[in-house]
Amino acid sequence: MESLFDDSALPREPVQLRSGAWHYPHWLSEEAQAWIARRFFEWGRGPVPPHQTLINQNPMSVQSLCLGWHWNPSGYSRTADDINGAPVAPMEQWLVDLGRRAVFDATGDAQKAAGYTPDAAIVNYYDIDAVMGMHQDADEKINAPVVSLSIGDSANFRLGNNVNRNQPWQDVRLASGDLFVFDGASRFAYHAVTKVFPGTAPARCPLAAGRINITLRQTGLS
Ligand SMILES: O=C(O)CCC(=O)C(=O)O
Ligand SMILES: [Fe+2]
């Protein structure tokens, strides 16, 4: 039975954490979350399998797959030369449309939203022990927004400063269906995921355990 007081009853509106950093809780409906989770299982079949990207020879704890452009620490490419050499799966139009809606809903800037054309998606799967260290998303050649969507278990997301991996930072709990947008003064903010909270996904989420995060990026590459 739907409870009047479950998370879905909370008000849906964007919260600006600071200039350019937007958190919009429960932005995706449960139906949309489930649909995306099922799409995630289909993406997992390839052409490039989910993989642990090596950073300085150390595997990241998340499993990643990409659409549009393949990412690794040396940058973006059209083929996954560090994995199996296969061409990356194409970017999907519904993700572009969703990205535009996300930018509009977060920022209220219709012109910015209309011009937003993400051409890469990085899809990360976090098992309950996975984390992501402090980093900037800085391999894109232009500073279009990064749109982040979370599905499954909640996580502690750490929004750092623009200068280095140290404090000041702010911790935000990202739950299933939450949208986060990095734009403007926060586009190149350092950020991290320090913990996944097991068993916190909505009951109807098809992801049995762990967390999916999708970031949409406009690379500026051609
Ligand atoms: O999982 C998240 O919320 C952030 C993911 C991230 O920072 C990235 O993929 O670059
Ligand atoms: Fe990132």
Image (cartoon, rainbow, N blue to C red):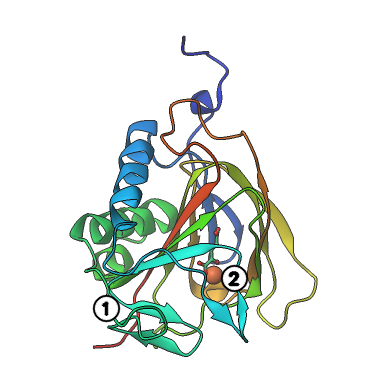
Q: Which mark is residue 170?
A: none
Vertically, is 187 above or below 213?
A: below
Mark 1 and mark 2: span between their CA atoms? 21 Å
Q: Amino acid at mark 1?
A: Ala
> Depth check: 36 or 147 in front?
36
Q: Going by the picture, which residue comes out furthest to the front? A: 84
Residue drawn at (61%, 84%), measured in percent from left and top? Answer: 57
Amino acid type, mark 2 = Met
In the picture of the structure, the residue carrying the numbered disc 2 is 60
Q: Which residue is mark 1?
A: 86
Looking at the rendering, which quadrant does residue 147 occupy?
Answer: bottom left
Q: Residue at x 63, y 68 (%)?
A: 191
Tell me residue 192's x, y (percent). Answer: 65, 65
Answer with left or right where residue 205 lies relative to residue 210.
left
SS at badge 2: loop
**In this view, 40 is above or below 217:** above
Ligand 2 positioned in quadrant:
bottom right
